[in-house]
Image (cartoon, grey):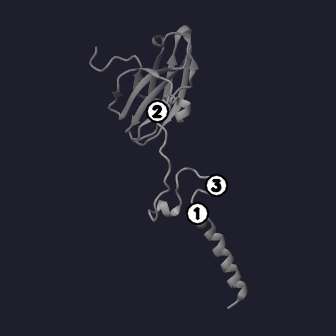
Amino acid sequence: MNLRLIGIGAGVLIILSLPLAGAIAGPDFAGQDDGKGGGLFTTLGLSEPARTAPAPAARPAAPATAEQSGAAEQPRTDSHCGPELSSPHGVEAQTCVLVAEGRTWGRSYYRNTSGRALDAVLTVMGPAGRTVRIACAVGAGDEPGLCETPKEDSAGEPESYSAVAEFAVPDDEGQLLLRSGSNSPAPGDG
C-alpha cells in the first residue's frame, strides 16, 4: 500500500474523532464544569451522572416580561366590519376598517370563484373629506385573498371612518359584480 494514503487516512480519522473525544470527555474541561455532569456516556445512559450537592431552596421567579421571554407583545387592532356578502357572479367579500396604534386603514377579504381575473378598488373615507384609495388585482383562482390600503395616521374617532370595496370585470364596460362596505347593513336588515 501507499504510505502516503495511509498517512492521509490516519490524519482524517484523527480530525473526525476529535469532536467525539470531546463529547465523551464531557463538559468538565480544565475545571470548567457546567454542573450537568454530562458527557456522551451519561447522555447515552452508559454511566451514572455526576452527583452534585442539593440546590438551595429556590426563590419564586419574577414574572417574565415580553423582552425576557423573547415574545414581543402584539398591539391591539380594533376593527369595524360589514357583513360577509356574495354575488351571483361568484365573488364573496367582507370589508373592514382597522385601527391600531393611532393608525387607520381599510381591508377587504375576498374570494373569487367567477373563473376570471377581476379588478378591485378599496376606498377608505375618513373625517374632513380624507380619502385613501388603492386598486388590487384579484386573481382567477378561488383562493381567499385580501386587498389593503396603506396605514394612515388617524384623524378622528374610529366610527368616523368607513371603507368600500368594489369588484368589477376588467374591461371597457367595467361591470360591477359586488360592492362590500364596512358599514353595510346585513342582508335582510332592510
Image position, residue 39 (x, y; %): 53, 60
Instruction: Look at label 2 and name its amino acid.
Output: Leu
> In whole angstroms, how far apart are the C-alphas of marks 2 and 1?
57 Å
Q: How many marks?
A: 3
Location of residue 190 by image quarter: top left
Q: Which mark is residue 146?
A: 2
Please tell me which residue lies in front, 137 or 25.
25
| Direction from residue 158 to residue 111 in the image, left or right | left
Instruction: Look at label 1 and name its amino acid.
Output: Ala
> In whole angstroms, how far apart are the C-alphas of marks 2 and 3?
60 Å
C-beta proximity under 8 Å, tags 2 and 3: no
Image position, residue 81 (x, y; %): 40, 21
SS for tag 1?
Answer: helix
Q: Which quadrant holds the N terminus?
A: bottom right
**Residue at the outermost front position:** 53
Disc on the earlier residue, 2 or 1: 1
Name the residue located 50 percent from the left edge and 56 percent from the top edge. 50
Are there few (<14), some (14-19), or many (20+) residues within 10 Å of tag 2?
some
Please tell me which residue lies in front, 11 or 104.
11
Disc on the earlier residue, 2 or 3: 3
120 up-or-down from 8: above or below: above
Disc on the earlier residue, 1 or 3: 1
